[in-house]
Amino acid sequence: MCQKRSSVMCFTTERDTEQFRVDPCIRHFIRVMRDMGFKTVGSCCGHGIYPLTIVCRTVEGKYFELISGIDIPRTRNFYRLDKDGFYFIPELTREK
């Protein structure tokens, strides 16, 4: 499990040269997901407070959380910050 705000830069494959920040404990998992063709646009390990979340975009341009399958009605700002400084997705869980 990562410490909060300990994300690192992650580089993708030659096919997908985008750089993005990701929690170190899930960066290899996210890289494999992207290599498999999933367009991940956000992720968080949950830091022991919230569940692991991975936000993906469909080819139609819609957004959903991969693990729960819940649609997200926004096109950005998927995560909210709780009072302790941890990120969560409101549609998936209540703030703790």
Image: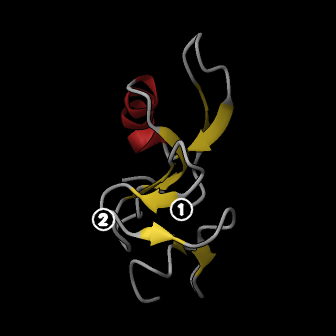
SS of the residue under disc 1: loop
In percent of width and height, residue 38 lies at 44, 36
Mark closer to the observer (2, 1): 2
CA distance for labels 2 and 1: 22 Å
Task: Name the residue: 53% across, 62% down.
Answer: 4
In percent of width and height, residue 6 lies at 57, 51
Residue reaching furthest to the front: 60
Numbered badge on residue 68: 2
Task: Name the residue: 65% across, 38% down.
Answer: 20
Q: Is residue 45 above or below residue 38?
A: below
**How many marks overall?**
2
In the image, 91 versus 61, the foreground residue is 61
Q: Quadrant of residue 25?
A: top left
Numbered badge on residue 23: none
The quarter of the picture where the C terminus appears is: bottom left
In percent of width and height, residue 39 lies at 52, 39
Residue named by callout 1: 4
Q: Is residue 35 above or below residue 46?
A: above
Q: Is residue 68 above or below residue 57?
A: below
SS of the residue under disc 2: loop
Amino acid carrying label 1: it is Lys
